Image (spheres, rainbow, N blue to C red):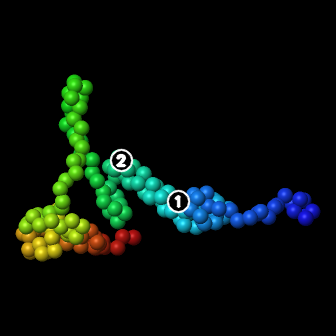
Amino acid sequence: MESSKETGCQAPEGPILCINNCGFFGSAATMNMCSKCHKDIIVKQHQAKLATSSIENIVNGSSSSNNEKGPVFELKPTSSQPSSDLVTAPKLETNVKEGPSRCATCRKRIGLTGFSCRCGNLFCSIHRYSDKHDCQFDYRAAAQDAIAKANPLVKAEKIDKI
């Protein structure tokens, strides 16, 4: 008993409940949260960090090799409008909820089972292949570009320089 008073360390009086009131017990190592709540907090922080870095990349216009992380959006400059138009009638473009997703060829409702093609359209299971929906995407040129990027031309010098 006297040794605990000398060192200033005290044993916990009882189990500590999670601070998120989920009903499980927490620990000091996980900021008084249970393991599940602590993991959720860590995942949210990681996602927020990725979101801020992708926003910075979009704003700075740098499109380096971030294609593996997710889609890259490009900002296109808009035409300058007179300031009087902005004051008198602001144009707010809100996306109205569109109807159900439909196949671009047969207009069949596809919902969650739709297949997106590289040409940018959404198709049903019958028209998902490029030969079934008259796809305009040039697969050959895309493959040639991918091969050219993956295998850069290495050119050696003809004469060894001293």
Say which amino acid is labelled 2: Asn
Looking at the image, which residue sits at the far right? Answer: 2
Residue 141 can be seen in this image: no
Residue 93 horizontal/vertical position (percent): 22, 41
Residue at image position (18%, 67%) is: 110
Query: As drawn, is 28 to the left or to the right of 108?
Result: right
> How many numbered marks appear?
2
Looking at the image, which residue sits at the far front? Answer: 23
Residue 140, label in figure: none
Q: Quadrant of residue 114?
A: bottom left
Q: Do tag 1 and tag 2 residues touch (Cβ < 8 Å)?
A: no
Q: Quadrant of residue 83?
A: top left
Q: Nearer the viewer, mark 1 or mark 2?
A: 1
Residue 155 horizontal/vertical position (percent): 28, 72
Say which amino acid is labelled 1: Ile
Residue at image position (28%, 53%) is: 73
Residue at image position (46%, 55%) is: 49
Query: As drawn, is 101 to the left or to the right of 65?
Result: left
The quadrant of the picture occupied by the C terminus is: bottom left
Q: What residue is shown with label 2?
A: 60
Q: Secondary structure at mark 2?
A: helix
Upstream in sequence: badge 1 or badge 2:
1
Residue 12 horizontal/vertical position (percent): 76, 63
Q: What residue is shown with label 1?
A: 41
Q: Dot 2, crowdedness within 10 Å: few (<14), some or many (≥20)?
A: few
Q: Marks 1 and 2, Cα distance to the nearest angstrom?
A: 29 Å
Q: Secondary structure at mark 1?
A: helix
| Nearer to us in this view, 15 or 104 | 15
Residue at image position (51%, 62%) is: 40
Q: Dot 1, crowdedness within 10 Å: few (<14), some or many (≥20)?
A: few
Residue 88 can be seen in this image: yes
Residue 2 horizontal/vertical position (percent): 92, 62
